Amino acid sequence: MPGEIDLFSLLVPGLLPILVGCTLLFVVLDLVLAKLDFYRFTWHPGLFRIALFVAMFSGASLLLRQ
């Protein structure tokens, strides 16, 4: 994957599509976990949400940016 992507003659970072995809996936996963009341088993729900997003984005970035 290149460093930049040409989007309507505007150069955007190559990680932007990964960020958008992870954000959409995270929103869906967050809604499912909230509906299942999973967050009441975590020590700090806000910290867990941030850590989950960072782990998803980092994992996807490492897998797709080889």
Image (cartoon, rainbow, N blue to C red):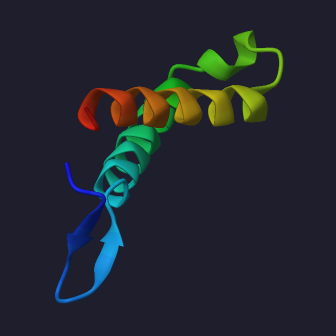
Residue 48, horizontal then vertical, whole percent: 69, 25
Q: Nearer the viewer, residue 23 or 66?
A: 66
> Which of the two residues, 54 or 65, is positioned nearer the viewer here?
65
Name above or below for residue 39 compared with residue 25.
above
Which residue: 36% across, 56% down?
20
Q: Is residue 42 above or below residue 49?
A: above
Horizontally, is 44 left or right of 6 in the view?
A: right
User: What residue appears at the point 75 percent right and 35 percent down from the top-left corner?
Assistant: 46
Residue at the farthest top position = 41
Residue at the image point whose x is 51% and y is 20% from the top = 36
Vertical position of residue 43 compared to residue 66: above or below: above
Vertical side of 52 occupied by 41: above or below: above
Rendering coords of residue 2 (x, y %): 22, 55
Spot the residue most to the bottom: 9
Residue 40 falls left or right of residue 14: right
Write the residue at 29% across / 27% down: 63
How many numbered discs?
Answer: 0
